[in-house]
Amino acid sequence: VMLFHAAIDVRVDNLVLRHGYSGVQFFMMLSGYVLARPYLEVPPLRPFDLGRYAVGRVTRILPPYFVVVLLAAALSFFHIGASATNVPRADLGWHVFTHLTLTHTFFAATHHSLVSVLWSLGLEWQYYLVLPLLLLAFRAGRTPWRTAALMLAIIVATLATRAALPVVAPARGDLLNGFFLARLTEFAAGVCLASLLGQGWSRPRLVALAVVVGGA
């Protein structure tokens, strides 16, 4: 991912680096797996405590994120590095507000503003909000067939969302990138992985499954 962005900055077109965005998709899957692992894979399964989970996400993510947002806003206000942080002063308050509330991916003007890569954290935060529902669903179906059926339903919902968004909001192509329902498969795949490992699936069997499903 780092080299992908570096190649953009120095205008290097490379066949491998051109697909660096797929590293973000892998990261989202890995995030789903790591967050779900204590609740679905590692025995004894940890009971889900919403308060503990929320405090953990807030204290781990928001302090450094807020520092980055406010620093980027200051650079933009003083027109330092304007090519990267070019937000009109009159609109700066709105941009900062959407970033601090992690709603910036819902608006076309703020989706990539201040620091363009922060869109990914807006998406990740949506995944954090939906994780308790995914855990509930995957814990209710602790058999391979139920797990597979649930994952298939998530894939269908993702594809339906991606098909509907260009019709409902034709001018908002950015929503395909920053709205969780349009990308839920990647995060849910990590949760599904933790669930299958918790059901006793072997790692070689899961690798083979991941290659087939990932290729598809």
Image (cartoon, helix red, strand yellow):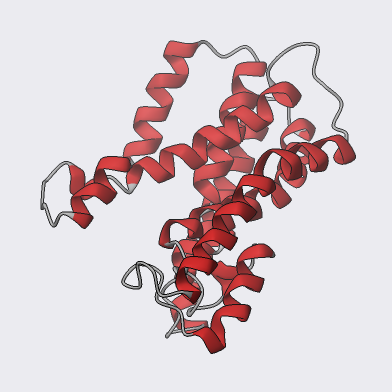
| Image: 68 above or below 46 | below
Indicate left or right for 184 with 58 as reference: left
Decide which of 22, 136 is in the foreground and name it: 22
Q: Residue at x 61, y 25 (%)?
A: 194
Measured as percent of width and height from the top left, residue 98 is found at 63, 71
Quarter that holds the C terminus: top left
Quarter of the picture holding the N terminus: top left
What residue sits 40% from the left and 75% below the top? 79
Side of 185 where 9 appears, left or right = left
| Residue at screen point 52% across, 10% down | 202
Q: 46 or 168, which lies in front?
A: 46
Q: Is residue 179 above or below residue 188?
A: below
Residue 160 seen by the camera: no
Q: Is residue 151 visible?
A: yes
Residue 196 point in image, percent of width and height:
60, 23
In which quadrant of the rendered view does residue 131 lie? Answer: top right
Residue 163's place in the image compared with 198, above or below, is below
- Number of disc labels: 0
Residue 101 at what x, y percent from top left?
69, 65
Judged left or right of residue 193, residue 62 is right
Report whether 34 appears left or right of 38.
left
Q: In this rendering, is residue 157 above or below 23?
A: below
- At 31% across and 42% down in the image, what residue appears? 2
Along the line of sight, the residue nearer the viewer: 175 or 114? 114
Kindly give the residue lying farthest to the bottom in the view shown. Answer: 90
Please identify the quarter of the rendering in which residue 48 is found. top right
Residue 45, position as x, y percentages in the image: 80, 18
